[in-house]
Amino acid sequence: MTSHRTAAHALAGISALVLTVGFLSGCTPEPDPTPTPTAAFASEEEAFAAAEEVYRAYNEALNSQRAGAVEDEEDPQDFLLGTALEGYLDGKEYLRSVDRSLSGATEIVAFVGEEARLDDDRSEVTATVCLDVSGIRVLDGSGADVTPASREDLLAQQIVMIASTDSFLISEESQGEASKCD
């Protein structure tokens, strides 16, 4: 009889546990719904304006770096990712390897937004940036100006920028069509 009683107690305990779990699961609050991602920018114009602001800050960081103002300035690398970052690092390494440096400042003459893809999960802007590089000098190791006389003063850069939260990072940068800067 003892074994019958023990089995009955065990069965009752299991039943109580199952009922308790059943009741508790019915009282468990529903998980909060996950928000549906929305585009960070409401319009192409807003995306182009934000991208231009970031590119101007990047240009200022480059100008500050060339001027030697390292402290309290943003690092140009902070604005870059992907092939744009690789190109920047390769360019710095190349100048170092040929004992050259750059001095002076570039000025953004125009920022022409060409395409904005404003997806919920990834926004991207393509633009042409027209840069006045007449103030940039190429210096050799002794500080002598070795800027090529044939260099154009106005350069076009084709850029692709990818949204990072509510801002952009430059992901690609290559030579653009000079005719877009005339």
Image: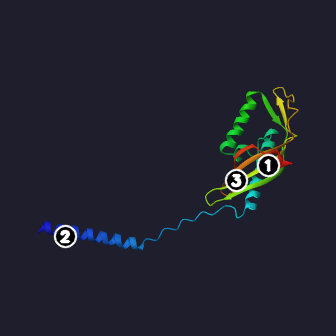
Q: Amino acid at mark 2?
A: Ala
Q: Nearer the viewer, residue 1 or 116?
A: 116
Q: Nearer the viewer, mark 2 or mark 1?
A: 1
Q: Nearer the viewer, mark 1 or mark 3?
A: 1
* Quadrant in the picture for residue 132: top right
Q: Residue at x 83, y 51 (%)?
A: 110
Q: Secondary structure at mark 2?
A: helix
Colouring of the image? rainbow
Q: Secondary structure at mark 1?
A: strand
Residue 129 badge? 1
Instruction: Measure the C-alpha gap from mark 2 to mark 3.
Output: 68 Å
Q: Amino acid at mark 3?
A: Phe
The answer to whether residue 55 is above or below residue 24 is above
Q: Which residue is mark 2?
A: 8
**Structural crowding at the residue carrying mark 2, measured as other residues with C-alpha within 10 Å and reported as few (<14), some (14–19) or many (≥20):** few
Mark 1 in CB contact with mark 3 (< 8 angstroms): no
Q: Earlier in the sequence, mark 1 or mark 3?
A: 1
**Structural crowding at the residue carrying mark 1, measured as other residues with C-alpha within 10 Å and reported as few (<14), some (14–19) or many (≥20):** many
Q: Which residue is mark 3?
A: 168
In this rendering, the count of numbered labels is 3
Please provide percent x and percent y for residue 160: 71, 49
Does residue 62 appear to the left or right of 4 in the view shown? right
